[in-house]
Amino acid sequence: MLSPEIYGDLSVLSNLTSLLIYDATGLPKTYGDISVFGQHPSLSDINPRQATITGDFISLKNNSKLRVLYLEGLQFTGDISVLATCTNAQFIYLGWCSNIAGSVNSLANMTWLRRLQVNNT
């Protein structure tokens, strides 16, 4: 009988150029670098919650389709000002990310932003 679990390196997703939504909620054995999502110009929702994802926000720069970014509790680095280039983002969850920095002032022109969660960062 097969074990009911999904696992593996996210780099294999780089060939899925039509990917719109990535949700790995409850999949702790998936891993990789966030740069794989930067290769998908149509990706609107990124939610690798509970996966082992690392990297720098710079790989998400200028993703105009990004609507939801849920990186809560994951190991990321970088300046949050890069996210200001994601002009259609509505929900950004960065709580408990320990290696991020920057001023929320840089996000002032994100007119579509509905929720910004940066607690315990």
Image (tube, rainbow, N blue to C red):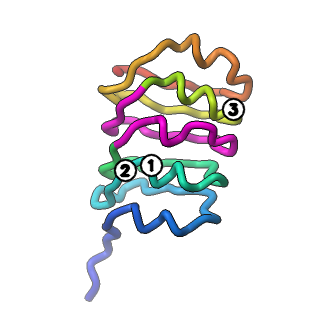
Q: Is residue 102 left or right of residue 26?
A: right
Mark 3 is surrounded, within 10 Å at the Cα level, by few (under 14), some (14 to 19) or many (20 or more) other residues, namely many
Mark 3: secondary structure? loop
Task: Single out the mark in the foreground, 1 or 3.
Answer: 1
Q: Amino acid at mark 3?
A: Thr
Distance Cα–Cα, label 1 vs label 3: 19 Å
Tell me the residue that label 1 is attached to: 35
> Do labels 2 and 1 touch, CB within 8 Å?
yes
Q: Please tell me whether residue 85 is drawn above or below residue 101 in the rendered image.
A: below
Q: Amino acid at mark 2?
A: Asp
- Look at the image and give the residue range highlighted in magenta: 55-78
Mark 1: secondary structure? helix
Q: Please tell me whether residue 60 is drawn above or below residue 26 in the rendered image.
A: above
Of mark 3 and mark 2, the one earlier in the sequence is 2
Which mark is drawn over residue 87? Answer: 3
Q: Quadrant of the C terminus?
A: top left
Distance Cα–Cα, label 2 vs label 1: 5 Å
